[in-house]
Image (cartoon, rainbow, N blue to C red):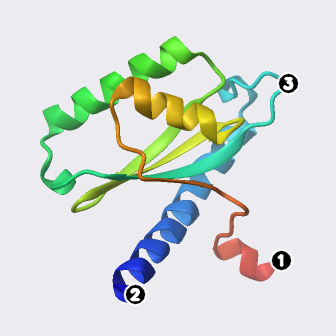
Amino acid sequence: MKTVKAISCCMIIALVLVGYTSFAQQLTTKKNLKINKSTVMKTYVIEREIPNAGKLTAEELKAIAQKSNSVLKEMGPQIEWQQSYVTGNKIYCVYKAPNEELIKEHARKGGFPANSVSEVANMINPATASH
């Protein structure tokens, strides 16, 4: 059990590290930001337990993405989906939102599990070692 938790923890850290590059690129282009200046957007990693997620077809993944986009459009610019990582039995998603409740609302409206929602406290990447 400890091994599974350690692997899950390592996967989340890896997701954050991989997502940092995408996040940094988006921050450098103002037109990509959909942030109301009075709203502080936080980054969240969502763990979704979906049996056999890694075996979902391209069409099934497309349908999931379309449903998520539809809910996001309905909810407005206060919540943004950055990217997701599909593994054997889970999907890890990176979202930006001002609070955890919006993340949970998106999951409810979309019919998606949100087994764990974690706010990202900080980000590091290989360049962190040289600063």
Q: Earlier in the sequence, mark 3 or mark 2?
A: 2
Amino acid marked by disc 3: Lys
Residue that appears at 61% across and 57% down: 20
Which label belongs to residue 37?
3
Q: Secondary structure at mark 1?
A: loop
| Residue 52 makes an appearance in the image | yes
Residue 104 on image: x %, y %? 52, 36
Q: Are marks 1 and 3 in contact (CB under 8 Å)?
A: no
Quadrant holding the N terminus: bottom left
| Residue 68 makes an appearance in the image | no
Q: Nearer the viewer, residue 119 or 35?
A: 119
Residue labelled with disc 1: 131
Q: Secondary structure at mark 3?
A: loop
Residue 12 on image: x %, y %? 49, 66
Which label belongs to residue 2?
2
Amino acid marked by disc 2: Lys
Q: Nearer the viewer, residue 30 or 77?
A: 77
